[in-house]
Amino acid sequence: MPPDYSGQNLCGRSFKGQNLEGANFSYADIRGTNFTDANLRKANFTGVKAGLHKRWALLLVLLSWLLSGISGYLLLLNGVLIAYIFNSSNIIESQVAGWIALIVTVIVYIIIIRQGIGLSFAVALVIAGISAGIFPVAFSFGVAKGVSFTVAGAVALAFTFIESIVVTLTFAVADVLTVVLALIFAVAGALLATAVVVETVGNLVLAGIVAGIGTAVSAYIAWRAMKGDEKYALVRNAAVAIAAIGGTSFRSADLTDANFTGATLKSTDLRDAKLIRTYFHKTKLLDRVRPGNSYLKYPQVRQLILTGQGQDKNLDRFNLRGINLKGALLKDASFIQTDLTHACLQDTDLSRAKLVKTQLHNTDFTGATLSGVYIGHWNITNETNFRGVKCEYVYTRLPTKENPNPLRKPDNNAETFADGDFADFIQPIFDTLDLYHNQGVDPRAIAISFKELAENNPDAELEIVAMEKRGEDKFLLRAKTAPEADKSELSAEYFKTYNQIKALAEKEIKLLLAEKDSQISRLEIMVMTALERPSFYSNTQIKEVGNMTNNQGGFSVGGDIGGNVNNVQGNNNRAVQGDNNQVIQGDGNQVGVGAEATISKDDIVKLLEELQTLVLEAELPEETKEEVSEEISAAKKATEKEEPKKNIALANLESVAQTLEKTNKTVDAGQKLWSKAKPIIVKVASWLGAAAGSYLLKL
């Protein structure tokens, strides 16, 4: 039974590396608790209080006040320099130095506010460079000018950077009153330091104004940093990292399906934590966690998780792997090329959302609304869950001005999917055994061989789902199998029997048929009909003989007759890129999913480079060449990986093929290019595992 720590005070405890799957921590005090590397799958953290222990938080606050005072002391230099302006006893060169200091300080503050801290550092380097040029001639006009130019910029930037981090840190660990005190310490530090060296009250007032302006700029930066302004990400990241020291640590912990509803998570370390379907509904201070590289690093994503309001949001190319958006409103949102692997999208409203080239392996759409979704090249697998999806129609391409409703499904605009139809329409049958025959198809041998296979392997749960004639004399028999079935062994066994039966004399075949029930004869007739009519049978007709394991009489075929037949089956999790999920090619008895035995990955990369060269050298519109070239590069990059991302490469390759085929019809130069490109595309598509009957393999 999982441990129950609900309501307990666990401050400072260590659960490092422990197995706490399903543990109940609801409403516990876990400030300063160490969960590093722990297994916290399905753990309940509802209403917990995480973050810094009181003693550690007090220490950080005191440290922030000390740093505020020290950073304020830096303004002494600027205050003294600027005071030269109003000191009549100084020589003209000192007053000029004061003006330079004032102007440089103002410029630095303007750049910081408008462009951010990062560019300000670049400006500081430029200032240093200019100063280096000033110093050689400074002795002719007074060293003070060059010194004031350098010091003013460096001091303004250093003070603003340090003080903004201090204020942001104080925001992260304490309240507004503590922040105000930190700002007061900064101004006080500047005034105290200046009072020691200035000669008049007027100069002291001026120094106070300078300190006040600098402090105000720092406070503004801290405020913008806590709001997630990317210009000040450096400040925010530094402050949050410091604030998380000594806080609750979930670093590298497994938080799959953990529940943080209503939890307080400031000063919490989530770096490298496994956040798969982790639920953060109504979580407090989620913006003050240390997120590492997880989806929590995006301000707009944090807001979406907390509010569930994502209508019209653009999240293209975001890494949202494992995000939990259960019940969110995502109408018209864009997720183009976004990684939503393992995401929970249960009961979401995704009406008219763009899911083009989106990674959706093991994504849960249970109960979601998908009407009007754009699904071109989306990457789903047999682990993608469409149970209970509500969908009336979808589009398989992105809209354009010329065609706002591209490739609608159902094709008839007056029709819609009935309840449950969309899941059947879109969910591929991945667990199929594809038996492809391309030489001397023998219907009787097919019927007997399949019957034998079904009887010898009852656990495979073989059920015929499709028959199709290919070309003039080729035939595909597709059977659904149990998910755990070994398709390679099943195919090898089937074709061994098939080749042996084809070699038997007519008299021996008749003896075999005499022993069997009527199902073999019915299947033989259906195969013959399929060969005569190049079309699929209806599901009703196929199901009549689909399950052939009822008669367990059995028989065997002896002898040494056989053949060297190769069969390679694809990955069950292969993403859908066409009408089916197996590719057919070659001229042996049957081949599935590419000729990887004869073509290497390097060969495919070279073919893609050759294709790219053809495109770049063709007389096509520059916009078309650029678009196609980028897609080929993306396909090549996906192929070159140690574990090739074939589904991504296929999606880009199909887009390339469609564009080039279109230019074949509209541009004269496109005809010559298409004739050269087409065989390359087909060859690459076969290696990548394109689906039998898919657009690419029908070129």
Image: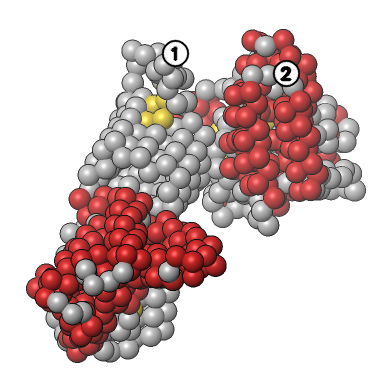
Q: Classify residue 4 as left or right of residue 374.
A: left
Residue at the (81%, 44%) spot, across then down: 603
Up-down relation of residue 662 to residue 229 (above or below): above
> Residue at (41%, 16%) from the top-left corner?
401
Quarter of the image that includes the C terminus? top right
Residue count near mark 1 (Cα–Cα under 10 Å), binned few <14, some 14–19, many ≥20:
few
Q: For marks 1 and 2, give the CA distance.
A: 25 Å
Q: Between residues 135 and 524, which one lies in front from this camera angle? A: 135
Query: Which residue corresponds to mark 1?
Result: 402
- For label 2, the residue is 619
103 and 589: which is toward the camera: 103
Q: Is residue 397 left or right of residue 291?
A: right
Question: How was the colour assigned to the protein in this rendering?
Answer: secondary structure
Q: Quadrant of the N terminus?
A: bottom left
Residue 169 falls in image quadrant: bottom left
Which residue is rendered at x = 57% and y = 22% of the image?
537
Question: Is 583 drawn above or below residue 490 in the view shown?
Answer: above
- In percent of the image, x 56 and y 49: which residue is there? 573
- Whether residue 102 is visible: yes
Element on which disc 2 rests = loop
Taking 353 as reference, is 398 left or right? right
Amino acid found under the numbered disc labelled 2: Glu
Q: Name the side, left or right, on which 515 lies relative to 158.
A: right
